[in-house]
Amino acid sequence: GGLNLPLKWFSIPQCWRYERMTRGRRREHFQWNMDIWGVAGEKADAELLSAMVTFFQNVGLTSEDVGIKVNSRLVIGEVLSELGIPAEKFAATCVLVDKLEKVPLDAIQDDLEEIGLDRTVVEKLTQVLTVTSIDGIKKVLGKESRAVQQIDKLMTLCKAYGIEDWIIFDASVVRGLAYYTGVVFEAFDRKGVLRAIAGGGRYDKLLETFGGDPTPAAGFGFGDAVIVELLKDRDLLPSFESAGIDTVVFAMGEDMYPAAVNVANILRSAGQNVDLVLENKKTKWVFKHADRLGAKYCAIIGSEEFAKGEVAIKDLELGEQKTLLQTELSKWASTALEHATPSQ
């Protein structure tokens, strides 16, 4: 009765946090989460990155607007090993290193000393974390490094997905949460005005931490606050004035209502979003209603047209009206969708 693996899922919960509010950071927000469970390795990581890029493209953003920094926790793990830092301190070190983007080293000095890290160790570590190229990290860790091989594989897959223009290697990205175990990534505003847009990575040990079976997993969280600010800045935020209705269908008389239901079914089956007027309204009211909804067409079911097997279709943008045979409705609906202009 359990879930079959691998499992791909998403959720959009409402989230809360106790936080000082700034632009793009609220105490209450909605967050799109996407996870892949049961797949180890870079294939799942690349699939998640592709999903994120697809969203950006669908809202009108380009790789000139948004980049995605990628790294691996293995990078910092290998560096810490070379510096003689025990493995049990890796996660706590990552949490502190993640703060260095926001605060100076002196601000976390006490925290570093608390976990037994010498300041010189952190200074050496931060030097490595300023590397922003694959070749650069290869010089530091060597071509045989597991971290380097992991990043190389991920970059190759990103190229196969056609998203390489969005992806940037940046060794400073470690993500502050202690449960990350491999690839980590963070989407950012190329202009540098806004904070991180989204972030995620691999967390292969998270489930067993809570008593479950060892299960590889990767995912990301994508809050609504920063992306809304970014879309506003780029003048891409949809107005939401339109209800997304393609055609309003109404019957000119109670006796025509069953025929109107049939027409609505045909148009919906062809892929249109249809609003069927349920009450007996006057034509003037229906046209005003369609205008409020931002509908593109009205399908008018009158007795004379129906007797001839026809339906009147009014193009609300052009103000033109024509009649179609009922047998032509499905083809017309599909064609109208193909030529529709997406509303912003």
Image (spheres, rainbow, N blue to C red):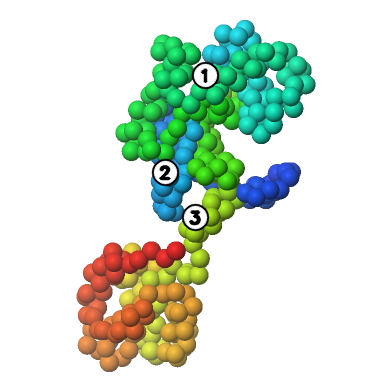
Residue 211, how many percent across, how many down? 62, 25
The one nearer the camera, 108 or 320, is 108
Pointer 2 or 3: first along the chain? 2
Gap in angstroms between the C-alphas marked 2 and 1: 25 Å
Picture quarter containing residue 332? bottom left
The residue under label 2 is which amino acid type?
Ser
The one nearer the camera, 23 or 267, is 23
Label 2 sits on residue: 63
User: Tags 2 and 1 in contact by the CB under 8 Å rule?
Assistant: no
Residue 322, how many percent across, how many down? 26, 84
Q: What element carries label 2?
A: loop
Residue 65, how many percent across, how many down? 46, 46
Pointer 2 or 1: first along the chain? 2
The one nearer the camera, 300 or 258, is 300
The residue under label 1 is which amino acid type?
Val
In the drawing, what numbered circle is on residue 234? 3
Pointer 1 or 3: first along the chain? 1
Gap in angstroms between the C-alphas marked 1 and 3: 35 Å
Which quarter of the rendered picture does the C terminus lie within?
bottom left
Left or right? Give the position of 213 relative to 62: right
Gap in angstroms between the C-alphas marked 2 and 3: 13 Å
The residue under label 3 is which amino acid type?
Arg
In the image, what residue occupies the spot 71% across and 48% down?
A: 21
In the drawing, what numbered circle is on residue 75? 1
